[in-house]
Amino acid sequence: WYADFIKGEGVMPLPPFADPFTYPGHYEQAVGSQGVCKGNLATSIKAYKNPEEKI
């Protein structure tokens, strides 16, 4: 299972003969988790003043 944010739905990549199933509410949970990640990223960029990566 994965969340397709472009289509706005959860996708089950199993072929029809594999008896695919659904996860009700998991797409909404994925959208919420994505928001948390974006917020954490913004906080980290601000806190660390976006330093350059050293190779």
Image (cartoon, rainbow, N blue to C red):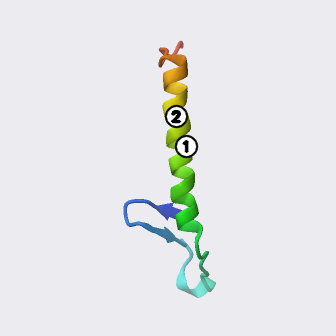
x 43%, y 59%: residue: 5
| Three-letter amino acid code of the residue under disc 1 | Cys
| Image position, residue 4 (x, y; %) | 45, 62
Residue 39's place in the image compared with 16, above or below, is above
Q: Is residue 8 left or right of residue 22?
A: left
Q: Quadrant of residue 6?
A: bottom left
Label 2: few (<14), some (14–19) or many (≥20) C-alpha neighbours in 10 Å: few
Instruction: Name the foreground residue: 39 vs 10.
Output: 39
| Three-letter amino acid code of the residue under disc 2 | Leu
- Circle 1 — which element? helix
x 51%, y 39%: residue: 39
- Circle 2 — which element? helix
Q: Which mark is residue 41?
A: 2
Residue 12's place in the image compared with 33, above or below, is below
x 38%, y 66%: residue: 7
Residue 33's place in the image compared with 55, above or below, is below
Label 1: few (<14), some (14–19) or many (≥20) C-alpha neighbours in 10 Å: few
x 54%, y 18%: residue: 48
Instruction: Name the foreground residue: 3 vs 55.
Output: 3
Residue holding disc 1? 37
| Image position, residue 37 (x, y; %) | 55, 43
